[in-house]
Image: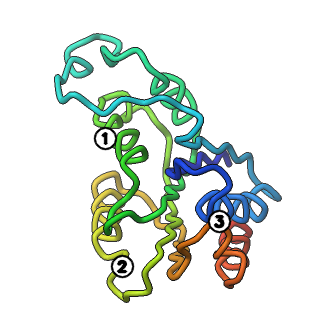
Amino acid sequence: MNILILSGSPRKGGNTDLLVEAFVKGASQKHNVEVVSVHDYKVNPCMGCNACFKSESNTCVQKDDMALIYEKAAVADMLVIASPVYFYGLSAQLKSIIDRFHNPIRDTFHIKKMALLLVGAATLPELFDSILAEYQLCLNFFKLEDSGKVLARGCKDKGDINRSGYLDEAIKLGETI
């Protein structure tokens, strides 16, 4: 299986990157895994012009790195969304990528499964609720199988996640895919 991870942290080597690395360690034992990190790609927000719905090739009028991400998604069987949580939502950089999937090209993808990796500084029980609602709506709309979640709370400073059990949880999730 080909797994594509969209990693939404603009900070290299931070808690989200470490969580992604742990998941990759588990999943890459049986699967091909590719990570798209927002800090390595330049993707503009969707302009809502709907030109992609009007063109024969469903191409976006914006000339940025999203075309590369579409190519990667076209060969993926599973999508993993990984993000730090800023003010109860996904990172703006990751949200730009997700919004750009508002393009009919997505209907050509073969993605059947999805998983979620989130890292937040707070420890509130409801910290991830708004993201979980959006995640569930995507699962329902695209008829995707939920392959699991790692919801890491209390990881504020770079490296905090190393002092938790979340990395082991991510490795185990990757191994069960």
* In this view, the mark in front (3 or 1): 3
Amino acid residing under circle 3: Leu
Mark 1 vs mark 2, CA separation in Å? 22 Å
Whichever of labels 3 and 1 marks the residue nearer the N terminus, that label is 3
x, y percent for residue 9: 52, 52
Residue visible at 31% across and 40% down in the picture: 99
Residue at the spot of label 3: 19
Residue visible at 74% across and 69% down in the picture: 175
- Side of 149 where 106 appears, left or right: left
x, y percent for residue 118: 49, 68
Q: Residue furthest front?
A: 157
Q: Would you say the residues marked 1 and 2 are in contact, meaning their CB atoms lie under 8 Å apart?
A: no
Using the rendered view, name the quadrant where residue 174 is placed: bottom right
Residue at the spot of label 2: 127
x, y percent for residue 130: 28, 70
Count the marks: how many? 3
- Side of 89 where 123 appears, left or right: right
Whichever of labels 3 and 2 marks the residue nearer the N terminus, that label is 3
Residue at the spot of label 1: 99
State whether residue 171 is above or below residue 42. below
Determine the secondary structure under disc 2. Answer: loop
